[in-house]
Amino acid sequence: GSLLINGDFLHGQTLHPCDFSHIILPNGKTLGETIRTCQTASDIAETISSPLHHVIQILAPDIIILECEHLRQEREQLVPLVQKVLCENFRYTSDMLPEIIITCCKFRHSHRGLAMRLREMWVDQILLRES
């Protein structure tokens, strides 16, 4: 996944957009490993809600872009489910949440092809909205 704060990507050590999949969960597994074991979109929403809550509280991003190759056909359901879980579990209202985008693009390959173009398109859209 990737994180935008005030229109800029938050970069990890490799200068790629931050990779949420490496977050270590209380069970000792990474977020990426845990998501791969999820069977439904609801499972994914529950799994990512706590890490997203911490990111929202600490960094106050404008937009969170998550890549999720797993359960590709259920991806459309994920954003509303994630928003619902965040509101129920952490007492957010919908206007308190950053924009959440879920994509199948792999940002770790963002220097190649379509993922790069999609990332540039999203950044352009964000900059246009702010101007």
Image (cartoon, grey):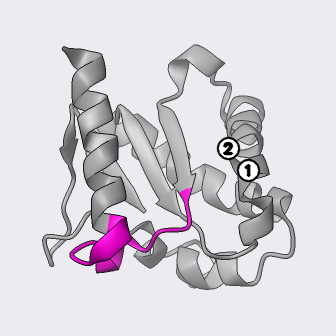
Residue 104 to residue 2: above or below: below
Asked if residue 76 can be seen in this view, the reply is yes
Q: What element carries label 1?
A: helix
Q: In which quarter of the image is residue 2?
A: bottom left
Crowdedness near tag 1: few (<14), some (14–19) or many (≥20) residues, C-alpha within 10 Å: few
Q: Gap in Å between the C-alphas at discs 1 and 2?
A: 7 Å
Residue holding disc 1:
76
Q: Do the residues labelled 1 and 2 touch (CB within 8 Å)?
A: yes
Crowdedness near tag 2: few (<14), some (14–19) or many (≥20) residues, C-alpha within 10 Å: some
Of residue 24 and residue 65, the one placed in the foreground of this image is: 65
Residue 55 is marked as none
Amino acid marked by disc 1: Glu
Residue holding disc 2:
79
Asked if residue 18 can be seen in this view, the reply is no
What range is drawn magenta here?
A: 103-115
Residue 26, image x and y in percent? 59, 72
Is label 1 or label 2 in front?
1
Residue 127 to residue 42: above or below: above
Residue 80 left/right relative to 52: right
Residue 21 lies in magenta, yes or no?
A: no
Residue 14 left/right relative to 77: left
Q: Which residue is drawn at 34% across and 36% down?
A: 61
Amino acid marked by disc 2: Val
Residue 34, image x and y in percent? 66, 79
